[in-house]
Image (tube, rainbow, N blue to C red):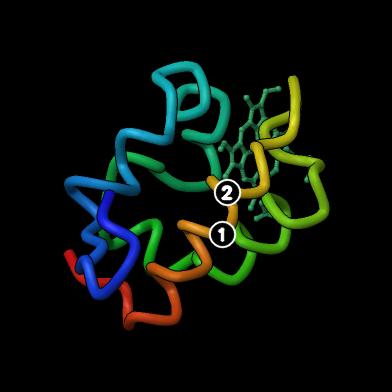
Amino acid sequence: MAATEQPISYAQDIKPLFREGDRESMSAAFDLWSYDDVVQNSDAILGKLRDGTMPCDGAWPEEQVDLFQRWVDAGMPA
Ligand code: HEM
């Protein structure tokens, strides 16, 4: 991804970060492959990603968490 002013979108940049197993594990709470669900739960998701407790099998690398953060800051474009 380009360093500056590259728009981040859920479909292109965020959804592919969630593995099928993540989706299945979390399906009782929300659907990580649903734009609306991720928007509605973005605070909780970001909190877990930041504190490293989710995914349960290993925290995301910092740059991946930062990408999610930037997407939230950008107003969560679809
Ligand atoms: C990027 C992937 C994931 C994200 C963003 C994520 C996010 C979250 C969030 C936000 C909650 C709190 C839900 C609530 O309180 O309503 C949660 C809970 C939970 N997640 Fe995940 N999750 C991910 C992957 C996984 C995986 C791979 C597992 C497999 C074990 C898992 C198991 C659980 C369990 C058991 C809970 C309930 C207990 C707890 O809050 O710690 N999650 N997750």
Give the camera-side residue of 26 and 64: 64
Q: Residues within 10 Å of mark 1 (few under 14, many from 20)?
A: some
The residue under label 2 is 63
Q: Residues within 10 Å of mark 2 (few under 14, many from 20)?
A: few
Residue 39 figure quarter:
bottom left
Q: Secondary structure at mark 1?
A: helix
Where is residue 67 drawn, in percent x and y? 47, 57
Asked if 31 appears above or below 70 in the picture, the reply is above
Where is residue 41 drawn, in percent x and y? 50, 64
Q: Residue at x 59, y 52 (%)?
A: 65
Where is residue 27 drawn, in percent x and y? 47, 34
Q: Amino acid at mark 1?
A: Asp
* Ligand 1 image position (quadrant): top right
Q: Residue at x 55, y 34 (%)?
A: 26
Q: Which mark is residue 66?
A: 1
Asked if 32 appears above or below 23 in the picture, the reply is below
Compared across the picture, whether 5 is left or right of 48 comes to: left
Asked if 11 appears above or below 7 in the picture, the reply is above
Asked if 8 appears above or below 57 in the picture, the reply is below
Compared across the picture, whether 61 is left or right of 23 comes to: right
Residue 9 figure quarter:
bottom left
Where is residue 16 drawn, in percent x and y? 31, 34
Q: Report how far apart the C-alphas of labels 1 and 2 lie in the structure.
A: 5 Å
Q: Secondary structure at mark 2?
A: helix
Tell me whether the residue at label 1 lies in contact with that at label 2, contact meaning CB atoms closer than 8 angstroms: yes
Q: Amino acid at mark 2?
A: Glu
Give the camera-side residue of 37 and 70: 70
